[in-house]
Image (spheres, helix red, strand yellow):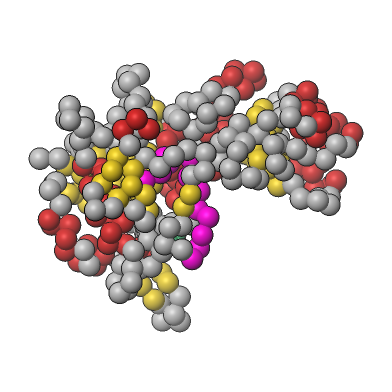
Amino acid sequence: MIKILLIYTGGTIGMVRGESGELQPFNFDSLLEQVPELKQVPCEIDTFSFEQPVDSSVMKPSHWVQMAEIVRDRYNDYDGFVILHGSDTMAYTSSALSFMLENLRKPVILTGAQLPIGMLRSDARENILTAMEIASARTSEGEPAVPEVAIYFEYTLFRGNRVYKYSSQSFDAYDSPNYPFLAESGVDLQIYHDRILHQDNGQLSVHTNLETNITLLHFYPGLDRDVIEHTLLRGNRKAVILHTFGAGNAPMESWLDDAIREAIANGTQIINVTQCRAGGVDQWKYAAGAHLARLGVISAGDMTLESTLTKAMVLLGEGWEGSEFRIKFEQSLCGERSN
Ligand code: ASP
């Protein structure tokens, strides 16, 4: 029988109201009691709970490391993994895990809920049950049907490093404009097999060294020169991610170019990712992007911000630097970019 490890990290899915009315993480056993249908899922389920379940806005890279280590340490004991997680930063975790779990050949499906499981209109039950079904699904050859890190939410399965949370209100809280859904659940569960990633390059290799001396420079009209120079030049950053306009455009100011040039000379990787959620960076399209390309700024292509940040953390943590970092970053490692 298929064996799945169900990992609880926290989030609304398992929360209850505290004394002053705000939602707080609750204990895993009570959460399981709310889903008696789990006993009917045709697989053997073991559970593991974070000692201290957290709201996902509290999560840090060390929590991703904890999740990656749980998967690594139990990889041979289970056919798949389902991670219950807060929805706020789930796309960061799924992106990070996709890069940390190199050569993954088993499903790691994250899910959560917009309403706590104890509430009448909660979306939690369906999300957990279908996530379990996806983690257990096999191809006609008996192989795992979705051997990648993915998020299942509100009838849709998304690639973990292509998805972002776009709504704090809708049950369908996620979207993945640059990559089609991996599966949809209706009367039947429809898995789009031709969209699934297959990594056949050998043994699972788990990267747990993450570089966190990285920061984000979010451009907006009127952003102060001091802030830009400070972000680029102070703190000996390993990488600064420019969160730019449109196709990767930023103000054409000689002082900005000088600061980027100096940061690159100091060994800081400068990466360009767009604020647009659909489409991507094409630095040569406009003069406002080409000045960045000429300086050696790395394009994140059509990657999400979540993927850009976590991919940089993992690659820098592994020790990639200089032009080798750029070459690696500009490749698709696990389906995170198409250009
Ligand atoms: N604040 C919650 C969290 O991310 C929201 C949720 O789970 O939906 O943990």
How far from the left and from the top, in percent, is residue 53?
Answer: 37, 59
Q: Image height check: is 73 above or below 295?
A: below
How far from the left and from the top, in percent, is residue 75?
Answer: 25, 34
Which residue is at the front of the view, 290 or 71?
Answer: 290
Residue at position x 42%, y 72% in the image: 23
How far from the left and from the top, in percent, is residue 110?
Answer: 36, 48
Q: Quadrant of the N terminus?
A: top left
- Check the image and name the residue furthest to the right: 254
Q: How many marks?
A: 0
Residue at position x 48%, y 44% in the image: 176
Q: Indicate left or right for 232 with 195 as reference.
A: right
Which residue is at the front of the view, 272 or 234?
Answer: 272
Task: Give the extent of the magenta segment.
Answer: 157-169
**168 falls in the magenta region:** yes
- Check the image and name the residue furthest to the front: 187
Majority SS type along the magenta span: loop
Q: Image height check: is 6 above or below 303?
A: below
Q: Is residue 309 visible in the rendered structure shown here?
A: no
Residue at position x 81%, y 51% in the image: 221
